[in-house]
Image (cartoon, coloured by chain):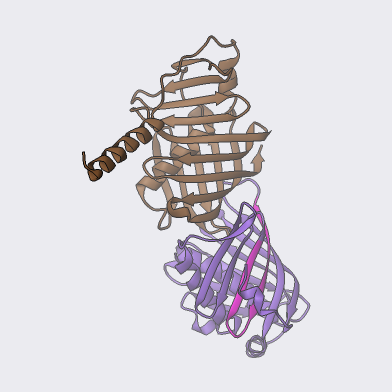
Amino acid sequence: MKKILVLGALMVTAIGSATSVCSQDWASLKESFRKIQSVKADFSQERHLQILKDPLISEGRFFYLASGSLRWEYLKPLRSVMLQRGDSIRLFHVSEGTWKQDMTQGVEARRMVLAEMSQWFQGRFEESRIFKHSYSQGPPARIFLTPGEGVNKFILGIEIVLSDRPGVIDRVEITEPGGSATRIVFRNVEINIGLDSKVFDEP
Amino acid sequence: MNLRNKWLAGLLAALMLCAGCLTAPETVLLQGEPEDLERCVELFPSEPWECVHKIDAVIQGGMSSSLLGITKGDPADQRMHTVLLTPEGFILFEAEQREDTISVLKALAPFDSPAFARGLMEDVSLLFFPPRGRPSKWGRAEDGAVLCQWESPTGYQKEVRLSTVKMISFRDKHGDLVKEAVLSAPFVKGLASQMELRAQKPSPYRLKLTLLSRTP
């Protein structure tokens, strides 16, 4: 459960840091987080596992509204989506060509993840009960997240590398014990654009 | 016999018939070709392999889930390693099996029961490993299908049936069908691109596996 929470937090950090600006001090970085009203981006995810010679590659996209809505969607190799509206979270996957609601297993863990994500979106890193944070202005600017006791059995650390373009993250890397790791690279990041509310309601 | 008794008798008969459907009829085999036995064994990887599948799982009540499955195996020493992940890459279950010994490395609820571990490793073994030793019988069915049957010392039976459809089935010592898998072409380096496994006992479920990658 803790591992799921922490891995999910990776997504949060990545999205949150989309508002960061290179060479900002921590206070102004937090201020820019607070100015985010919406985010839209594509991502590619590499999952490195000891069992696999080559990483698992996934492609997806996400949408976020500061009012409390999130869509985290995978397009390849599996088509699946997590939809959050306030406290309500629904999971769907495509099976035999149609969207189907997922079994309830894992929903609670994902709910915890998304709650953590919402805090981070707003730059509220101090409120995290999982990570201690540190910030390096770079270049490139980086946010380091260090897990506390217990979670460090599953996650050694998270590094968020910001791009030169203000408000855009380049990549996020999460390191796990035993040589496993996850790397998410963001592209086509758009901030404070209008988003149709349907993207948070319908798979 | 009043109406209620007739209804009960009918129900009992129906249940007996249903139970009969699952029991393996004694198969009479015709003499096969010398290479038929080889064809049965060729259905399974003969060298170490590593593959990733998309898994669509449907359990009792029609509830469904979509997962990623990684399996790595070495037929020479009957060793396999399997991982189940969510689409996000969270590991739900990870276990290794060497011959008959299962070691669970990670397991999140509801995938943390010994019964789940046994069932999953049995599924992987059914789909990827040929049974040890020579078959108890093999040959041709009346419809021309190649058929090979292996029986374990405890009476469990694994059967490979090759015709236009390639099937693997697993029956318990009473002859009742436990699991059955249909393997569909095209085959990628010997592995079916699609597999559908239907389990009957102890509880029914259906897994549809789509091959995403195979190494080597």
Residue at the front extreme of this rendering: B2
The region drawn magenta spans A55-74
Q: In which quarter of the image is the N terminus of chain A?
A: bottom left
Residue A56 vertical position relative to residue B145 in the rendered view, above or below: below
Residue A146 vertical position relative to residue A66 in the rendered view, above or below: above
Give how far across and how far down residue A46 sits, in percent: 65, 58
Q: Which chain is purple?
A: A
Give how far across and how far down residue A180 sits, in percent: 56, 55
B90 and A144: which is toward the camera: B90
Residue B81 vertical position relative to residue B25 in the rendered view, above or below: below
- Quadrant of the rendered image containing residue B46: top right
Give the overall secondary structure of the magenta segment.
strand
A28 and A6: which is toward the camera: A6
Residue A118 visible in rendering: yes
A6 and B2: which is toward the camera: B2
Give how far across and how far down residue B168 sits, in percent: 51, 30
Give left or right: position of B191 versus B110: right
- Quadrant of the rendered image containing residue B136: top left
Find out whether residue A63 is within the magenta segment. Answer: yes
Query: What colour is chain B?
Result: brown
Residue A143 visible in rendering: no
Q: Quadrant of the C terminus of chain A?
A: bottom right
Residue at the left extreme of this rendering: B1
- Quadrant of the rendered image containing residue A31: bottom right
Give left or right: position of A96 versus A132: right
Residue at the image position 51 percent from the left and 50 percent from the top: B57
Residue B99 vertical position relative to residue A41 in the rendered view, above or below: above
Find out whether residue A167 is within the magenta segment. Answer: no
